[in-house]
Structures are given as structure tokens and as C-alpha cells.
Amino acid sequence: MPIPPLPILLLLGGIAALDGTSVGQMMVSRPLVAATVAGWVLGDPVAGLLVGGMLEVLYLGVLPVGGVRFPETGPAGVVAGAAAASMGTPGAIPLALLLGIVVAELGAVSITAIRKVNGHFAPDPEVDPVDARRLERVHRALVLLDGARGMALTFVGLALGRFALGVLAPAWPLDQSSTALLLGLGLMVPGGALLASLGRRRIALPLFLAGLAAGALLA
Amino acid sequence: MSGMDPGAESRTTVSHRARTFRQAWLRCLAIQGSWNYRTMIGTGFAFAILPILRRVYRDDPRGLAEAVRRHAGHFNAHPYLAGMAVGAVGRMEKEGEDPDLIERFKTALRGPLGSLGDRLVWAAWLPATALLALALALWTGVWWVAPVAFLGLYNIGHLTLRTWAYRMGVREGKALGAQIRSSGMGRLADRLSPVIAVLGGLVAGLTVSRIAQEPGFPEPLAGSLVGLVLLLAVGLWGGEPARKWATFVLAVSVLGIALTGVLA
């Protein structure tokens, strides 16, 4: 009996959320991977890869350093990949991208919230004696809680996609080439910002242009 | 154990020690599991170093409780390099160093392990491997090349860095500071920056060419290309604030266009 895709997508969302911060950081949580796998689960990995690649360009320059608030790309990638793969219309990719951006921001809010919850449960050595076994139990429980948060966020994203994109996708007014142009224009600023994050713009820009020419020749 | 020959006893001890250090390495994979704004990865640090502490204080429950208390306080570092601190502090605990010295040592490590890891991993290795994987997928036209190449390449570097960092910590102990300075991690990050610029251009060039080759794509691309270059320049000079605004504008534009279609 085939397993229905919803439990698989929720599990993927949970794993992606865990991989983002709590366990491993093997980068299964990058949209390039999460969205492609979600698209593959729904039978259209190329749509997943397209939207995952675009989310990657949007968020590749975001550094999850220290206590800063950052968009969460793992569950967002799963939701966007699933949405892109399930629509099959010219509006599929931009609307899936929009959904991915919304879920990434919801993820940022939920990470801030769970870090406050973690602070409530984590042993405070300034106040209480810290028991080794209790510390292990709490740490493992908080890892599980983060996985559950990822699954819940993925569920919310998929529900939002089903409701909103069900209305918006059939009415998408642009054809394929205009849609591609819109997305190309929209991704240029984040692409430039990624280049800027490398520093030394006078060196980075000529190298980027050399790469651009090489890419155009190779295609 | 009195009947056991000394060689076998020594081998058993070495094997136990290796297992203990392996357990601590594995636990470092989950060092951020209880990340919070009070102790940051402090609870995770205590969780990761616990197998070593249990071995060091195996006959001293009060010593163990005190050591766990000391290590559950505030700590932060890049997750891949935090193992370096776990290994070094584990060795210092084993050698019976003064707890105040260990605390000062941990405090001194926080900054370098955070900034070096952020520069090398998040700002250099991650974009380099992601862009290389995207370029390979666009060039070959095979969808699975992107995730497979990215995960493969990225994690070769990732797991090598984690293992190297942990081993260096265990080997150097309190002499770690000098080794970090001479490790060349910062230089490696600097060397990756030009590679990322070339790969970014390669991905952009391959993408634009692929889109332009699509059947039915409109001819008058010249105006669009001027727009693409102008927007790239906006991002290049606007940096992170420009990225945030562009993401917002893109999302609002897509929503606006979709709503126009619904209302039409």
C-alpha cells in the first residue's frame, strides 16, 4: 500500500527543522534539497528544484549567527517544493515561492518562541543544582520539541497553500515567459546582495561577470 | 581484574577512552538542541561533554555534579567548531586543571570559534557548494545532480571540519589558542570568496541562457537585460537591507499579480 504524501511531507518538515539548528546541520534543511525532495515525493522534482533554487538565491546570504532572528528555510522549502509540484500551472513557481517566503518568516517567529521555551526548561546552574541525568532528559526532550515544531509549521504551511493557492493559481494572469522574467528580475537584487556579502566588490564584480559569460557560453 | 595481563588491561582502557571520546563527538552533532537566549548552547555543551565527565569523575559523584554545573552555564560557538572546545575542555578536565582556568579558557574560545566558523562555513563553504551544485544541475540538465552534489560536497567539508576540530581540541587541550591562530581557517574563507563570485556568475549565466532558449520566449530581451543588470547593481550596493526589501517587494508583486487575476 503506498504511503500518502502528507505524513511523508510532515516528517520531512520535522527533519528539515531539526537539521537547521538542533541536530546535524547536514544542510538537508537548505531549500535546494528540501524543496527538491518534497517535489520528488509529489512526482515533480524539477518544479521542486526550481522553487528551491530560487529560495536558495533569496536566503543564501543570510547568516544564522548568534541570537539573530533569521528566516527558517527547511520547512519553507518542503512546503514550497510540495506546492510547486502539486499545481502544474504557470503560476505554480511564483506562488510556491511566495508561500515559501511566508513560511520562512513564520519559521523565524516560531524559532524565537521555542528558544524562549528552551530557556524556561534548560537547567540554570546559577539557581539550581544541575543533575546530569535530568540535563540529558531535558536536552533530548527539547530536541524532540523542535522536531514537533517543524512538523506543525509544515502542516500550517501546507494548509495555507491548499487554501490560498487553490484560489490564486488557476487565475494567475501571466504566461510562462513573463513569469520567468518577473522571477528573474525579482532575484537579481538578492543575487547582488549575496555578491556584496563577499566584500571587496571591485574584485567580486569582474569575477561575477566572467562567470556570467562562461555560463552563457556553456548553456 | 587481578588475573588480567597488563597489556590487555591497557588495551581495554584505551578502547574505553576512545569510545568515550567518540560518544562526545557524536553528541556534538546535537550541541544546539536546547539553544536558548539564557545559556545559548551551554546546556548542549554540558550534554556533549558528559561522557568525558562521567569517565573522569567515575568514582566521584559530587565532583561530577559540580563539573556538570560548571559546564551548563553560558557558552556559544559555531556548531561545527564547538567540538574543538568540547575536546580541549574534556582533556583539561581529565588532566585535573583548575576549574577557574577552564572557565576562563572557555570564555576566551567563544569569540574566535564563533567568528571563524561563521566566516568559513556560513559565508564561504555553504554558498560555494550550493552554487557549484546549482551550476552542475543547470549545465547537465539533470535534476538530482543539484541535491546530491550539494549534500555530498558540503558534507565532505562539514564532517572533515567537525572531526579535525574535535581531534585538535583533544590533542592540544589548553594549548589550543595558538593552534587556532595558525590553523589558516580565516585564509581559507578569504580564498573561497572569489570562487563564490565566479560560481554566482556561472549560475546566473546558465539560468538566463536556459530561460532564453525556452520555446516562445519573447525576443525583446535587451530592455530586460538592462533591468537585470540595474537590479543586480542595487543588490550589490544595497547589501542585506536591499535583499530584505527585494524579498518583500517580490512577495507583494506575486500576490498583487495573482489577486489581479482573481479579480479580473
Image (tube, rainbow, N blue to C red):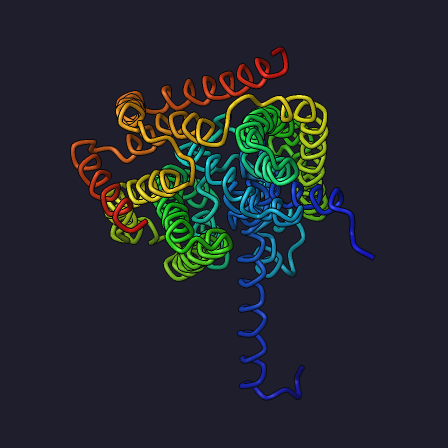
Q: Nearer the viewer, residue A66 or B53?
A: A66
Could you tell me residue B24's position as x and y percent?
Answer: 56, 57
Looking at the rendered image, the quarter that the N terminus of chain A falls into is: bottom right
Residue at screen point 60% across, 43% down: A16
Compared across the picture, whether B102 is left or right of B17 comes to left
Against B116, is B61 above or below? below
Q: Residue furthest top?
A: B263
Q: Nearer the viewer, residue B40 or B156?
A: B156
Could you tell me residue A209's position as x and y percent?
Answer: 21, 38
Compared across the picture, whether B241 is left or right of A40 comes to left
Q: Nearer the viewer, residue A41 or A26?
A: A41
Could you tell me residue B125's position as x and y percent?
Answer: 36, 47
Q: How many marks?
A: 0
Q: Quadrant of residue A82?
A: top right
Q: Nearer the viewer, residue B199 or B9?
A: B199
Could you tell me residue B58's position as x and y percent?
Answer: 64, 60
Against A157, is A82 above or below? below
Q: Quadrant of residue B23?
A: bottom right
Asked whether residue B192 is in view, the answer is: yes
Residue at screen point 64% across, 22% down: A168
Against A113, is B6 above or below? below
Asked whether residue B88 is in view, the answer is: no
Residue at screen point 53% across, 57% down: B25
